[in-house]
Image (cartoon, rainbow, N blue to C red):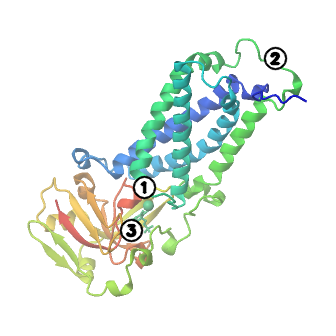
Amino acid sequence: MKLRLAPPSFSGRLHDARTATAIGRRLAVAVAVCFLTGVLSHYLQRPPGWLAGELPSRPVWGYRLTQGIHVASGIAAIPLLLAKLWTVYPRLFVWPPVRSVRHALERLSVAVLVAAALFQLFSGLLNTVQWYPWPFSFVPVHFAVAWLLVGALLLHIAVKAPQIRAHWTRKSPGTLELPAEDGPDRRSLLLAVTAAVGAVTVTTVGQSFTPLKRFDLLAPRHPDHGPQGLPVNRTAAAAGVTAESVPGWRLNVYGPTPYALTLDELRALPQHEVTLPIACVEGWSKSAQWTGVRVRDLLDRAGARPGAGLRVVSLERRGAYRVMDMGRTYARDPLTLLALRLNGEVLSLDHGFPARIIAPNRPGVLQTKWVTRMEVL
Ligand SMILES: Nc1nc2c(c(=O)[nH]1)N[C@H]1C(S)=C(S)[C@@H](COP(=O)(O)O)O[C@H]1N2
Ligand SMILES: [Mo]
C-alpha cells in the first residue's frame, strides 16, 4: 500500500466564493455598524481635551441607543463570523501554500483580519459579562484593534472586489448548477445563519431595549434585576464603600468660592426630578427617575464661569471610575443632577448613597457614585 500525502479537497458549493460573498456582506454590515458606534462610544467616554467641552448632552437617550446597537451588532457578528470562517476554511489547505509574494501578502492580511475579528468579538463579548481574563486594559486595546480590523477588512474587500462583484447579485454568471449530493443548499445555510443571528439578538437585546426584556435569557443583565429596580455594576462592597464611611459625609465643592454641604443642607436646596437612563458601556441600560440638585446650581454657587468644566471625585478609594471629568455642555445641562433619590426612594448604598451624578447622553461609567468632592475646572 502506498501512502499518499495529498491535501484534502473540498467540492461543496457552500465553501465557494458565492457563499463567502453572501455571508461576508452581512458580516461587513455588522462590523461597520459595530465599528462606527464603537468609535462614538470611545470619544464620548474618553474625549481628547479639545472635544471634552463640546460633546452634546442631547438627545438624552443618544448613548443608550448607540451603545445598545454597538453591543447588539457585535453579538450578531459572532454567528456571522463563525459561518464565514466555516465557509472559507478549506482555503487553509491551498496547495502550494504560497504561490507568489503577492499571494503571501494576501494570506498574511487575511490572517490579520481573522485574528483581529476574533479578538474584537470575543473580547467585547467577555466585556459584556465583566470577565477580564487578560493582563491588558480593555478599552485602549479594543479601540486599537478595531482600527486594525477595519484596515484589514478594507484591504480584504479591495483584494476580493472582483469576486465580490461577480457574486453580489442573485443571478451570477455560470457554475451554480452543481449535483444534488452537494449537501445542504446555500439558501438553507443562509437561513440557518439568519436564524442564529435572530436568536442571539432576541435573547440578549432586551438588556437595553426594554420592550424585549421578557426574552432577555442570555444577556448577563436583566434591566429589572437590582435594588430599586435598577441593575448595579459595581456594588458598594466591591468599591469598599460601607455604611460607616458615610456618617460625617460632606459634599466639598472647590472653585472661586469653595463651600461644603451636609446631606441635610443638600436636601434643603431646590430639588429637581429627571427621567434619565443609565446606559452601561457593557450593554445593559435602563431608564429611571432621579431627584436631586442641579450640578449647574452647585457650580454657580461656587462662582464658576459658564464655560467651566467639572471634576467629580468619589468616596471610593481606588478604581478606574473614582475620578470623573465632565465638560461644560453636561455641567450646564439642566438635566444633570447630583442625585439623592432614585425611583422615589433615597439612593441605596449600591446606587451611590449619599449622592451620585446622573447626566444625559453619557456612558454609565461616567455616572459617578458616592460623590464626595466636586472641583470647578
Ligand atoms: N464611584 C464609582 N461610580 C460608578 C462606578 C464605579 O465603579 N465607581 N461604576 C459606573 C458604572 S460602570 C455604571 S454602569 C453605573 C451604574 O450605576 P448603578 O450601579 O447605580 O446602576 O455606575 C457608574 N458609577
Ligand atoms: Mo458601566
- Give the CA distance from mark 2 to mark 1: 50 Å
Q: Amino acid at mark 2?
A: Glu
**The label number, if any, that marks residue 177 in the structure image:** 2
- Estimate the x, y position of residue 322 in percent, counting from the top left: 32, 67
Residue that badge 3 annotates: 290
**Is 159 located above or below residue 47 in the figure?**
above
Residues under numbered marks 1 and 3 in contact, where contact means CB atoms less than 8 Å apart? no
Q: Nearer the viewer, residue 79 or 345?
A: 79
Q: Amino acid at mark 3?
A: Trp
Query: In the visual, does 166 lie left or right of 47?
Result: right
Residue that badge 1 annotates: 136
- Indicate which quadrant contains ligand 2: bottom left
The secondary element bearing badge 1 is classed as loop
In the figure, residue 274 lies in which quadrant?
bottom left
First-in-chain label (2 vs 3): 2
Query: In the visual, does 111 lie left or right of 290?
Result: right
- Estimate the x, y position of residue 74 in percent, counting from the top left: 55, 45
* Residue at the spot 25% in from the left edge and 77% down from the top edge: 266
Quarter of the image where the C terminus is located: bottom left
Res 348 visible: no
Q: Amino acid at mark 1?
A: Phe
The secondary element bearing badge 2 is classed as loop
Closer mark to the observer between disc 2 and disc 3: 2
Residues under numbered marks 2 and 3 in contact, where contact means CB atoms less than 8 Å apart? no
For disc 3, does the CB lie below 8 Å from ligand 1? no
- Estimate the x, y position of residue 186 in percent, counting from the top left: 76, 29
In the figure, residue 30 lies in which quadrant?
top right
The crowding category of the residue bearing disc 1, from other C-alpha atoms within 10 Å (few below 14, some 14 to 19, many at least 20), is few
- Give the CA distance from mark 1 to mark 3: 35 Å
**Is 205 located above or below residue 268 in the figure?**
above
First-in-chain label (1 vs 3): 1
Quick one: which residue is furthest to the right in this view? Answer: 1
